Amino acid sequence: MKRRNFITKTSINTLAFGLGIHSLAQAGTAKNSAEKLKKKNTTATTPVAICTWQFTEANATAGALLDQGIPALDAVIKGVAVEEENIKNTTVGKGGSPDREGNVTLDACVMDHTGNCGSVMCVENITNVAALAKKVMEDTPHVILAGKGAEEFAVKNGFTAENLLTEESEKAYKEWLKTSKYKPIINIENHDTIGMLGLDKNGNISGACTTSGLAYKMKGRVGDSPVIGSGLFIDNAIGGAAATGMGEEVIKTVGSFLIVELMRNGMSPQEACEEAVRRIVTTNPNHTNFQVAYIAINKQGETGCYCIHPGFKMMKYANGKNMPVVSGSHLK
């Protein structure tokens, strides 16, 4: 065989072989994509409720309402209200630790399955700020109301104004004034938020996030909790996420939005939470001094959670059972 014919024939055979492999590869990729798409388009109809930290009663309340067919947004607002009204919880609602001037200010946001959202910031004298955020979402042309404006709007709409500084919180504040030392304690002062996500019987996802913020914060300080995309984000086609911990660090990476986008690109809720934490620890060498934790759920009802330091737990309600889930952590 002449050299030119040999090269030509070899090239043709090589090309044909290559095309065959390529075709097989394409077929395999198409099959995998189809399987992923099928899974992605599957929507769970068994209700699921998850929340940050071991707020057992709050999560059980939301889960039971979901089982009754209550829409996800209403269920999670009722759920977080349990902690907003719990005066023993010094990080949420009434009884929350005050700022450096002795004033209790609350932040909250909600987001429903249609993409609508509402938020309130630096609210004094109103306990159920998650419900107030829903009122802002439904009855105003705005997304956010803050300070006195939010409080006045609340009173006009039937919310009761009351002193949020309890005797115990005031006593702790006066003790703090003796040194005025500001150094949040990991998993204590930093567990400043209840973020809750619900998947209802219609397969719709909604969320709520509510907090009194860091103890003895500067006057006017707002963390991630009422910031849509940071403390909470929902995309009903994909899933939802919520954050707790050092809000400043969550804001810098728009953490909850990031998690939903990672799930959109194929990650599981667990993988997405882990990646969101990794984004923080790889850019901030000071991460050993603060806690950040995330929870997430997707349309299939799969959930995930992850944090920087050990000690964080998520509550999960599904199939009538409400159980704590110990989170994995970046630091061991």
Image: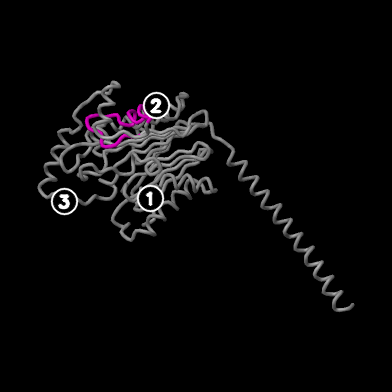
Task: Tell me the quarter of the picture where residue 227 sits.
Answer: top left
The image shows residue 76 at horizontal and vertical percentages of: 39, 31
Kindly report the distance in space between the C-alpha atoms of the residues bearing marks 3 and 1. 26 Å
Mark on residue 167?
Answer: none
Q: Residue at x 74, y 56 (%)?
A: 23
Task: Tell me the quarter of the picture where residue 150 sits.
Answer: top left
| Quadrant holding the N terminus | bottom right
Residue 104 vs 16, above or below: the answer is: above
Mark on residue 307?
Answer: 1
| SS class, disc 3 | loop
Mark with earlier residue (3, 2): 2
Crowding near the residue tagged with mark 1, few <14, some 14–19, many ≥20 C-alpha atoms within 10 Å: many
Residue 75 vs 310, above or below: the answer is: above
What's the amino acid at mark 1? Cys
Task: Tell me the quarter of the picture where residue 104 sits.
Answer: top left
Dot 3 and dot 2 residues touching (CB under 8 Å): no
**Is residue 140 on the magenta stretch?**
yes
The image shows residue 283 at horizontal and vertical percentages of: 37, 59
Bounds of the magenta segment: 119-141
Q: Which residue is drawn at 39% across and 53% down?
A: 329
What's the amino acid at mark 2? Glu
Mark with earlier residue (3, 1): 3
| SS class, disc 1 | strand
**Is residue 321 on the magenta stretch?**
no
| SS class, disc 2 | helix
Residue 193 vs residue 187, the one in the foreground: 193
Residue 105 vs residue 32, the one in the foreground: 105
Q: Which residue lies furthest to the front in this view?
A: 141
Crowding near the residue tagged with mark 3, few <14, some 14–19, many ≥20 C-alpha atoms within 10 Å: few
Residue where numbered disc 2 is placed: 138
